Amino acid sequence: MTQRRSPLSWNQVSSYHVQNFGCRASQADGAEIEALLAERGLSRAGSASDAEFVILNTCTVTATADEEVRQIVRRVHNQNPAAKIIVTGCYAQRAPEELARMAGVATVVGNSHKSQIADLLPQAGAPFHGQVYAGDIFAEREFRTAAVVAAGDRSRPNLKVQDGCNNRCSFCIIPFVRGRSRSAPADGVVEHARQLARDYDEIVLTGINLGRWGRDNGAGRLSDLVRRLLRETDVKLIRLSSVEPMDWSDELLRLAAESPRVARHVHAPLQSGSDAVLRRMHRRYRPGHYEDRILKAREWMPDAAIGADVMAGFPGETEAEFEETRAFLDRLPFTYLHIFPYSERPGTPAAARGDQVPVEVRRRRGRVLKELAAAKNLAFRRAMLGRTLAAVVLEDGRSAVTTNYLKLELASDRPPRRRIEARIGDVINTGLAEASVLPVLP
Ligand code: SF4
């Protein structure tokens, strides 16, 4: 149900707290929401307990993600009963009424209305509860973003350049809550990146299906956008958050391999290494296509981070199919893996299948893959010993993230957000440690 009303005014000294859930694209949305509220004169509260408006920018990728949101709604309402809770994001788009019924929820703003959120905050003392603003997300044809710079991570901001997805992976609810693929106009991206480059050396380009940038509006390909950013901005490091395997074109890989200003980092969601499982997932590539892209990435960038998302225990996954995935992961040069036991998302074809894998089997398979991932990551870190890597310093000034996506403890404090070169001296539990520089004696 969609209800509309005129925007109401609110107390200009009101304070807000935004809590984000989910992927990097969602984090970028959260930063935009904060910027929109700050632009209207609201101030940021120290925590949800002190805020008048608590904005929960949600994810709905799994049933667990939904439950986490409901728990936070209950906790915020208990700790701060006077707070007006505004729930937005993907869960708000998927099931607005379910959220609107919860105690403490003043307003639910679906993705369809998220860019208007500053106008939809409830007025102080407003008598209503559970107001819903959620419309047909498939009607969206424009990429909507606030006319402000998105600053996500405090040291390495996300810049969202694409939203929505035209694929229909059988396990995924995202196309139904994000709508069709829509790209940010290149001129706007360049302008935002220029603004960000004044304060940050690294920018992370994000999107729901980032590799599809430019296809809907005829702007070109993602590689064209990256080339423009290299040419027309001073950004010192551009990282691509996640690109579907078949969108890692030779051109895009070549840019990463040839430009020291593009992070040596290839993240390509895999989900399964079994042909039959990929077909049931309605994924558009076969294991051979995927392997070709990964081997090319490794051939052109021997020191690059190569990562994937993998699902364990998709409906119908047999022991033999799982073993195909394990062996596939084992033989390819991954440096890290994000492993998720399959989790039913109601409303998707996969959730309706009658051949669900028992939860304990999903978990066991997940554990096997996580052990494999840890061993691969350790081998990669060891291979970096003695090397000098570009890295961007995090907010604490004592740690950094390398171009090839390893956490690095620094030997001495450095200015946050800046790009540095560091020699790797040790492998530690959390990642790598910089070699200490011995003082030069007179
Ligand atoms: S590519 Fe598949 S998994 Fe990714 S957002 Fe689109 S439908 Fe979901």
Image (cartoon, helix red, strand yellow):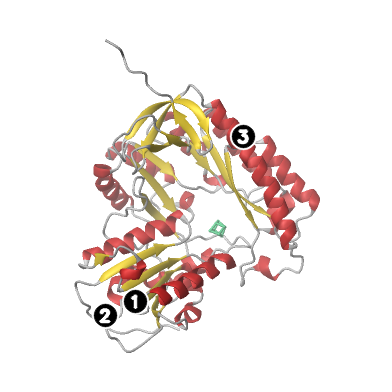
User: Which kind of residue does numbered mark 2 sit on?
Assistant: Pro
Q: Nearer the viewer, residue 377 or 426?
A: 426
Identify the disc placed on residue 7. Answer: 2
Visible in this render: residue 226? yes
Against 415, residue 41 (above or below) is below
At horizontal 72% and vertical 51% (from top left) the residue drawn is 365
Q: Which residue is mark 3?
A: 333
Relative image position of residue 171 (x, y in whole percent): 63, 62
Q: CA distance from mark 1 to mark 2?
A: 19 Å
Which numbered tag is attached to residue 133?
A: none
Please indicate whether residue 411 sits to the left or right of residue 231 in the image: right
Contact, CB < 8 Å: mark 1 with mark 3? no
Nearest to N terminus: mark 1 or mark 3: 1
Marks 2 and 3, Cα distance to the nearest angstrom? 53 Å
The quadrant of the rendering that contains the N terminus is bottom left
Ligand 1's quadrant is bottom right
Instruction: Kindly identify the amino acid type of the residue bearing the numbered disc 3.
Output: Pro
| Left or right of 44 in this view: 319 | right
- Looking at the image, which residue is at 38% across and 60% down? 29
Q: Position of residue 292 (x, y in %)?
A: 62, 37
The residue carrying mark 1 is 83
